[in-house]
Image (cartoon, grey):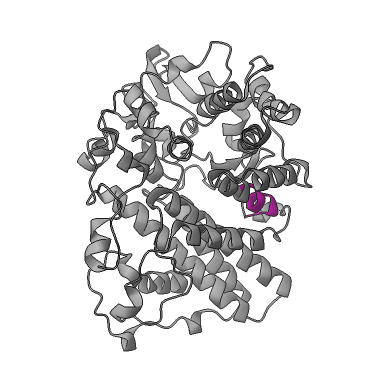
């Protein structure tokens, strides 16, 4: 694995996508990868490396980076007293610029991950080992490449579409124009259709790897984002009625119990373990309150004041999503304004950022609500749409809904998504795809928001290195 990682970091100089500021590298000195991809173990290591950016140590994509880059910018969260970084606080008031380091880091980490996927997709087929496993590994890498490009196209719009490992570092090869958003989506869909051939499930030793159900579920999300209601409905039905065994946990709290990691509701998750020297889920500490003996936490993210009151007292999700009191090591109960709770792992010191609770990238509740939304947009609130929506509501302890107009049902789905997926990096994407970003951010006092914020700016460093990149409007 060390040899693999050395090659990976050497290869992601392309397009200025890493921190190297010079494009004048000597191709003769470029490290070839051929010697590193010879055995089944090499192939598995190559694909494992594509998963790593989901959950690596530090601020990786689903381990704080999206929370900083999107949730704090949305109507869901604000920086807490321990979030002192000026670039982080700029996101909270929508004053971030093209030079903001989180704008750059999100771009950089996604392209580094895509490059790893490209290497695996290119190199693994040439290794002589079990053909079934070989095909499976390539399709896992294709799913992950699709996920990374899906994030990029939703955040930045059309982006450079890189599908091969770089072997020529001359400027005319590494300075690439932006593909259109449609071109990026076509590649995402093609990769996910290949990934639908993945297994429906795995043995315990491989839990957490991409499955066919995950590929179909991400395709559903892509189609929903594209407002392709027919394909979204069809794909959701395949997931719900397919041989995958997905279901809601009986109790919402079970979704965030680490004993249930990779359980029946978890379609695809970033994998974490407790007490792993900084490689756990740091969201377990970012939201926990400070000043409580024995559990002093990060206090880096706090909910907007408008969020907690959206929950009714009977909603079982409220007290799983938020802390409002906690018992300290001195036996005293401390009460405080709401703080995020979902990933709090009492078995570790919150200051270590080592929660063992997986981060759910796709879960079955999402499929149900997306199915309900697509059905309603196509034909109004059908019986199947009510069934899907009400399965989520009744699990939360709420009464089922009925007799709604199409617009009322639409708002009910939007509201249910907001309550269900707090602190799961869904809110920004939901506001953007439904065209409600500006109005909702203004409603919580984030008055700097403008139409330009529907897209991130292309990082200024990338434009400086690659003049063929054009900046998004308004930036």
Measured from the top left, where is residue 270 in percent x and y? 53, 47
Q: Which residue shows up at 30% across the image and 55% down it?
A: 458
Q: Is residue 363 above or below residue 319?
A: below
Q: Which residue shows up at 43% across the image and 39% down it?
A: 432
Quarter where residue 108 is shown: bottom left
Q: In this view, does 458 lie to the left or right of 405?
A: left
Q: In this view, does 342 lie above or below 404?
A: below
Q: In this view, does 184 lie above or below 337?
A: below
Q: In this view, does 365 lie above or below 185?
A: above
Q: Which residue shows up at 43% across the image and 60% down it?
A: 180
Residue 272 in the magenta stretch? The answer is no
Measured from the top left, where is residue 179 in percent x and y? 42, 64
Q: In this view, does 173 lie to the left or right of 275?
A: left
Seen from the viewer's position, the closer of residues 117 and 83 is 117
Is residue 109 at all visible to an observer of this figure? yes
Quarter where residue 394 is shown: top right
Measured from the top left, where is residue 291 in percent x and y? 31, 22
Determine the residue located farthest toward the bottom in the rendered image: 28
Seen from the viewer's position, the closer of residues 106 and 187 is 187
Measured from the top left, where is residue 222 in percent x and y? 56, 49
Q: What stretch is highlighted in magenta?
A: 210-217
Q: Please count the marks in the image.
A: 0
Is residue 277 at all visible to an observer of this figure? no
Seen from the viewer's position, the closer of residues 395 and 45 is 395
> Most prominent secondary structure in the magenta stretch?
helix
């Amino acid at each position: 694995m060390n040899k693999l990682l050395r090659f990976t970091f050497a290869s992601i100089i392309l397009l200025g996508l890493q921190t190297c500021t010079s494009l004048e590298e000597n191709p003769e000195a470029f490290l070839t990868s051929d010697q590193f991809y010879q055995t089944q173990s090499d192939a598995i290591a190559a694909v494992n490396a594509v998963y790593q950016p989901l959950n690596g140590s530090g601020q990786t994509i689903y381990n704080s980076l999206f929370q900083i880059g999107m949730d704090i910018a949305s109507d869901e969260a604000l920086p807490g007293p321990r979030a002192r970084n000026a670039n982080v606080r700029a996101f909270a008031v929508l004053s971030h610029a093209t030079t903001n380091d989180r704008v750059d880091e999100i771009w950089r980490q996604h392209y580094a991950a895509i490059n790893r996927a490209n290497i695996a997709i290119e190199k693994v087929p040439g290794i002589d080992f079990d053909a079934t496993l070989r095909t499976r590994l390539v399709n896992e890498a294709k799913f992950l490449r699709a996920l990374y490009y899906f994030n990029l196209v939703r955040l930045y719009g059309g982006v450079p579409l890189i599908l091969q490992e770089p072997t020529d570092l001359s400027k005319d090869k590494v300075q690439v124009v932006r593909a259109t958003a449609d071109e990026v989506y076509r590649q995402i869909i093609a990769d996910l259709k290949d990934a639908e051939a993945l297994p429906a499930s795995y043995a315990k030793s491989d839990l957490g790897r991409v499955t066919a159900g995950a590929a179909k579920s991400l395709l559903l999300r892509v189609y929903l984002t594209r407002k392709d209601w027919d394909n979204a409905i069809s794909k959701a039905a395949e997931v719900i009625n397919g041989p995958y065994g997905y279901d809601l946990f009986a109790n919402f709290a079970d979704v965030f119990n680490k004993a249930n990691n990779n359980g029946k509701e978890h379609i695809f998750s970033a994998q974490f373990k407790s007490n792993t020297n900084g490689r756990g889920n740091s969201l377990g500490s970012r939201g926990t309150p400070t000043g409580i003996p024995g559990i002093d936490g990060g206090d880096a993210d706090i909910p907007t004041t408008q969020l907690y009151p959206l929950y009714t007292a009977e909603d079982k999700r409220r007290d799983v999503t938020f802390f409002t009191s906690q018992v300290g090591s001195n036996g005293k109960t401390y009460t405080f304004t709401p703080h995020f709770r979902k990933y709090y792992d009492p078995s570790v010191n919150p200051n270590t950022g080592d929660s063992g609770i997986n981060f759910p990238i796709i879960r079955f509740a999402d499929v149900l609500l997306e199915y309900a939304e697509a059905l309603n947009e196509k034909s109004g609130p059908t019986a199947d749409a009510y069934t899907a929506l009400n399965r989520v509501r009744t699990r939360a302890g709420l009464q089922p809904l009925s007799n709604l107009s199409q617009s009322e049902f639409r708002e009910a789905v939007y509201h249910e998504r907001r309550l269900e997926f707090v602190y799961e990096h869904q809110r920004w994407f939901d506001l953007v795809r439904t065209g409600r970003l500006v109005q909702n951010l203004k409603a919580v006092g984030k008055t700097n928001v403008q139409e330009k914020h529907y897209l991130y700016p292309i990082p200024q460093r990338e434009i400086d290195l690659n003049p063929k990149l054009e900046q998004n409007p308004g930036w």
